[in-house]
Amino acid sequence: MNAEYPIIEQALIYIEKNFKNQPELDEIASHLNISPSHLQRTFKDWVGISPKRFLQFLTIDHARKLLQESRSVLEATFESGLSSPGRIHDLFVNIDAVTPGEFKEMGKGLKIEYGQHQSPFGICTLATTQRGLCFMGFHGKAFGQSFMDDMTSRFPEAIFKENKSATQVYFDAIFNPNQPKKKLTLFLKGTNFQIKVWEALLKIPSGNVCSYGDISKIIGKPKANQAVGSAVGANPISYLIPCHRVIQNMGIFGDYHWGSARKKAMLIWESQK
């Protein structure tokens, strides 16, 4: 299934560009240079629905409905407070934030091991320290900054070493549903405000979405929508800290650091699980 993601992404990009024309299966398949049956089968295998249903998912009306349905779930979820561990599927996630002194040192003397893995959303890179997972990003051409530049810019003075075995345990915990429940620690470099936003993101259940305004209210800063948006965009651990679950209040899915097509793919993939 993981190898099918490039087809899904290219189909999504085409649908986005031609959304108003509501392209049929044959048209999308022709653009991808594959047969309609191959495209139909790939969608069914990957997410369990047809391209036509996939197209319906992208509508503003559907996004607004998803946002409305999610809010009742989120109200109950956030009653537990931001201080309790976030839960993603069967994972319990705790945050270990860098100290002010460590923030200034920019990772000096820190050893970071990273590895590339084939995920349901294309190739991703994870990076870890002795204190926990510190980075997760995706490969592709839909964004300007490369995953390597993005990763190293967060800890420019750190020592980076490729070691896939060091990150495999995190990858398996995130993407292998047959793994037993695990408790993961995230080692995060961010301002106090950013950390609070990322804690809030960890509370959004899979299959649900919220708006930037919702996050602002949750963290007690109802007028900080723009600052919340910047913090969401600076999220260092994509997918696990689910910034892809934040959409615009009017029902527009919005941009994503690793490509808007990948964001929509993540949301529809989760909605069917």
Image: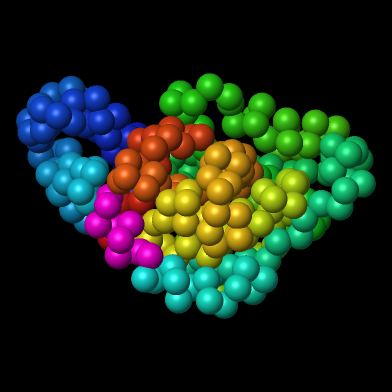
Left or right of 250 in this view: 84: right
The location of residue 139, given as percent across then percent down, is 51, 32
If the image is split into quadrants, where does the C terminus sit?
bottom left
For residue 177, what is the image quadrant? bottom left
Residue 85 seen in this snapshot: no
For residue 183, what is the image quadrant? bottom right
Closer-to-camera residue (253/184): 253
Residue 189 seen in this snapshot: yes
The location of residue 169, given as percent across then percent down, is 62, 59
Q: Is residue 168 magenta?
A: no
Q: How is the image coloured?
A: rainbow
Left or right of 184 in this view: 29: left
Q: Residue at x 58, y 68 (%)?
A: 86
Extreme residue in the front direction: 223
Q: Residue at x 29, y 38 (%)?
A: 8
Q: Is residue 68 magenta?
A: yes
Closer-to-camera residue (224/78): 224
Q: Main secondary structure of the magenta part?
A: helix
The location of residue 137, given as percent across then percent down, is 57, 40
Q: How many numbered circles does the render carry?
A: 0
Q: Residue at x 12, y 44 (%)?
A: 52
Q: Is residue 103 above or below residue 6?
A: below
For residue 234, what is the image quadrant? top right
Left or right of 113 in this view: 216: left
Q: Residue at x 60, y 60 (%)?
A: 219
Closer-to-camera residue (13/6): 13
Magenta part of the chain: 63-71
The location of residue 230, given as percent across then percent down, is 59, 39
